[in-house]
Amino acid sequence: MANDRVPTPPPLHDLPTAKEKRYDRQLRLWGASGQVALEEAHILLVNTGSGVTGIEALKNLVLPGVGQFSILDSAIVCEEDLGVNFFLEDESLGKFRAEETPLESFLQKDDNLKPFTLLLVGAPIDYASLRKIRDLALASQTPLFYTHCIGFFSHFSVQLPRAFPVVDTHPDPTATQDLRLLKPWSELQDFAKRMTDDLETMAQHDLGHVPYVCLLLHYIDKYRTQHGKLPESYKDKTAVRDMVRAEGKDEENFEEAYAAVLKSLNPPTIPSAVRDVLSAPETQSLTSVSSSFWLIANAIQRFVTKYSVLPLPGAVPDMKARSNDYITLQQIYKSKARADCAEVTASVRSLEKSTNRSAKLEIPVNEIENFCKNAAHIHLVRGRPLQLITPGEKPSFGDRAKALRSELTNPESLMGLYLAFLAFDDFTATHTPPVPAHPSSPTGVLVPGASDSALEADAAKLTSTAHTYLDALINESGNRLEDPEYSDLRAEIEKYCTEIARAGGAELHNMASLTGGLVSQEIIKVITGQYVGVDNVCLVEGVASRMGTLKV
C-alpha cells in the first residue's frame, strides 16, 4: 500500500515574533533600537489642572509601548474627568486622580525626579513648583515638556539637556546620496573604465545597461581631458549634461545620467552644522566618561583632517543596469564605506584607551557604523532653559531678542499668542487664592476667567501684561516697531488674551487631543534620539487652524 503521508515541511526561519507583528509599523519608523529606548523609558506626568492634554499625550505613549509612566495628580475625580481621562472608571469617582502625594511635598527631595527619563508638566501649575521642576530638570539634564491648552489655543515648550545630539535624523533618501563622482577612488574608477571602454562601438542592448554612475564618470573624464579641469561650475555641469544628451541615443540609463548631472557632480562638502559638532568643546575635551557621541565625533574629526571628507555612507540609488553589474557597483561602495568605518573605529578604540575609558563603556561597532553612515546629517540641539515669568517682572529674551523681534512682522508667526501664554502664567502666579481654593481651581491656582463676574477684568489684566511683554521685547531687541504694524499686533494680542480669558482655563477635548498627539510625537523623538524635533516652542491657533514654532 502506498504511503500517502506528506512529509513534514522544514520549519520556517526568520518569522516575525508576536512583538514584531504588534509594533510592525512603528519599527519601520524608529527601528529596534528606538523601540528598546521607548520600552526602557519612565515618564512622569505632573497634572494640577484638568489635565486632559497630559492624559492624551500619555495615551499616545502607552500605545506604542512606553515602559513605565507615573502620574502626579492629587485632584479628586469628578464626573467631568470620566469623559476625558482614559485611565479612570466610574468607580474612580471621589477618589484621587493619581498619587495622593501633594506636589509640594514630592518636590522637597531633589532626588525624587531621578528615576524618570522625561518630565511632562501641564498648566496651570503653581509658579514655585514649576520653577522647582525646571531647576531640577536642568540639574539632572532630564528633558522637560511644559504644555498649555486653553480654549482653541495650545502651546508646548521643550527643555532639553545642554547638549542633545541626534545621529539618526532620517533625512530624505535623495539627500543621503554621496557618489563621490568628482573624487572617485581607484576601485570605482577601474570599474567605470571597464564598463565604458568601448562605449562608442558597444551593442545597443549593452549600451542601454551601463550604470549611469559609470556613464557620468566616463563623461567627467572626457570633459577633464578636453578642458583640463573638473566640471564644478554650473556652466561646466551643463556642458557635461549636453555631452550625455548628444550621445544618449534615447536610452533610459542615459536619461538617468542626464537627470543626475546637476545634483551628483558636486565636490564632497561638510555641512556647517556638522562642522559645529566636530569643533564643539565636548568633541575636543574628552574624558573617561564622555558620551559615546563625542568620542565618535572626535574620531570623525580626525578622519576629516586626514582626508577632507566625511566617511562614505555607501548607499547606491536604483538605476537601470544588469543585476550583476549593479551588485558589483553596490559592493564597491559598501567596501569603501566599511573601510572608512574601520578607520574611524580604530580611532575610537585609540581614544577609549587614551582617555582610560572603562571596558564596560566600550562603544559598540554598530553605533560607530550608524554614526559614519549618517555623519553628513547629524544634528546637535543646544538645550535652553524653559522661559519662566517671574511675577511682577518683565521677561528677558536674551540672545533671542532680535530674532523674536523679527517674528513680530511675520504675518504667519504666532509670537503674539506666545506672549499671551506668558501673560497667562503671570496671572496664575500672581492670583493664587487663599485656602479654600476657588471651586474651579481645586489645586489653588486661579486662572483668568474663572468666574463670569471677573471675565472682563481678567481679560484686561492679561492684555495689559502681554502688551508690557511686547514692549519689553521690542526695547530689548533695540529695533522699534512702527505703526500700523505695532497697533495691529497689539490688537491681535488683545484678541488672544480675550479668548484665553473667555475659556476660563477649559481644555476643549479636540484641541487637547491634537496637542497631546503633537507632544507625544516630540517626546518619542526625544526618547528614541531620532528625527529632528521642535526647538523649542510650538504653538497651535485652532480658530484659524494655524501652527508655528519659535526658538526662545
Image (cartoon, rainbow, N blue to C red):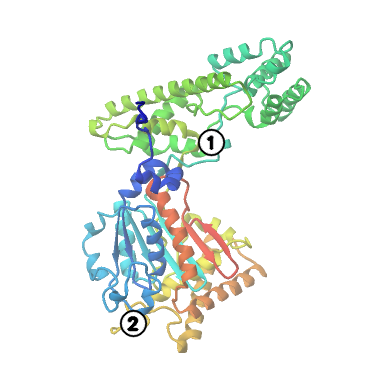
Q: Position of residue 522 (x, y in %)?
A: 44, 54
Pointers 1 and 2 in contact (C-beta within 8 Å): no
Kindly report the distance in space between the C-alpha atoms of the residues bearing marks 1 and 2: 54 Å
Compared across the picture, whether 199 is left or right of 288 comes to right
Q: Nearer the viewer, residue 407 or 360?
A: 360
| SS at circle 2 | loop
Is residue 472 visible to us here? Answer: no
Q: Nearer the viewer, residue 451 or 281?
A: 451
Q: Nearer the viewer, residue 291 or 205?
A: 205
Compared across the picture, whether 512 is left or right of 19 comes to right
- Report which residue position mark 2 lands on: 433
Q: Position of residue 391 (x, y in %)?
A: 39, 72
Q: Residues within 10 Å of mark 1 (few under 14, many from 20)?
A: few
Q: Residues within 10 Å of mark 2 (few under 14, many from 20)?
A: some
Q: Nearer the viewer, residue 354 or 193?
A: 193
- Report which residue position mark 1 lands on: 271
Q: Position of residue 388 (x, y in %)?
A: 40, 64
Is residue 504 visible to us here? Answer: yes
Compared across the picture, whether 195 is left or right of 227 comes to left
Q: Quadrant of residue 345?
A: top left
Q: Position of residue 477 (x, y in %)?
A: 54, 60
* Position of the N terminus by quadrant: top left
Q: Quadrant of residue 495?
A: bottom right
User: Which residue is situated farthest in the bottom direction here?
Assistant: 453
Name the mark on residue 548.
none
Type of residue at label 1? Answer: Pro
Q: Please name the residue shown 42% across and 57% down the image.
A: 520
Counting residues from the N terminus, which is met first, the one under dot 1 or under dot 2?
A: 1
Type of residue at label 2? Answer: Pro
